[in-house]
């Protein structure tokens, strides 16, 4: 079981995700493949264009996995948001998710400087 809908108690299984993947909806492929890797035993992790954390990590603080965060008019947990972010293309929508939901879920601040005195980061 990948997800259980809190309202209907319906279970989404790996089989259903595999069927969904075969429909060819390109804008959901990253989400489906990430679920396959994390929850269904797929051996290769996808390389999504968008991750929840701007530093490339899928998850923020795992202690916040059950925290509820608003994304538009919808509510998601920090445990669900990496799957949502993986379905977005790189660009403004991805950056918006990282800035808002990413920070609420414990990702490092996007305001941190990426420049260091030495080129090797020391």
Image: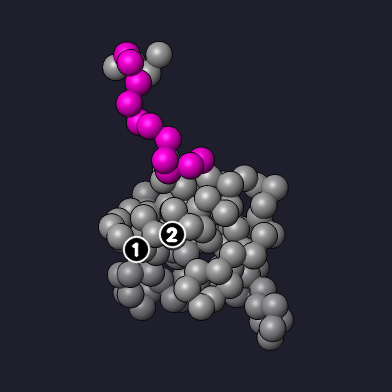
The residue lying toward the viewer, choosing from 109 and 54, is 109
Q: Is residue 29 left or right of residue 91?
A: right
Taking the image as drawn, is residue 2 in sight? no
Q: Check whether the beta carbons of the residues at disc 1 and disc 2 lie within 8 A of each other.
A: yes
Residues shaded magenta:
108-118
Q: Residue at x 29, y 17 (%)?
A: 119
Q: Residue at x 65, y 78 (%)?
A: 5
The mark found on residue 93 in the picture is 1
Label 1 to label 2: alpha-carbon separation? 6 Å
Tell me the residue that label 2 is attached to: 97
Secondary structure category for the residue under label 1: helix
The residue lying toward the viewer, choosing from 67 and 81, is 67
Neighbours of disc 1 within 10 Å: few (<14), some (14-19), many (20+):
few
Say whether residue 109 is magenta. Answer: yes
Q: Is residue 87 above or below residue 15?
A: above
Say whether residue 53 is magenta. Answer: no
Q: Position of residue 64 (x, y in %)?
A: 67, 52
């Amino acid at each position: 079981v990948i997800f259980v809908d809190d309202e209907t108690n319906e279970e989404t299984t790996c089989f259903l995700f595999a069927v969904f993947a075969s429909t060819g909806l390109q804008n959901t492929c990253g989400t489906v493949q990430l679920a396959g890797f994390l929850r269904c035993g797929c051996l290769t992790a996808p390389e999504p264009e968008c991750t929840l954390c701007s530093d490339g990590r899928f998850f923020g603080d795992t202690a916040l996995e059950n925290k509820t965060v608003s994304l538009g008019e919808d509510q998601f947990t920090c445990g669900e948001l990496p799957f949502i972010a993986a379905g977005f293309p790189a660009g403004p929508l991805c950056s918006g998710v990282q800035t808002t939901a990413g920070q609420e879920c414990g990702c490092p601040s996007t305001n941190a400087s990426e420049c260091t005195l030495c080129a090797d980061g020391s």
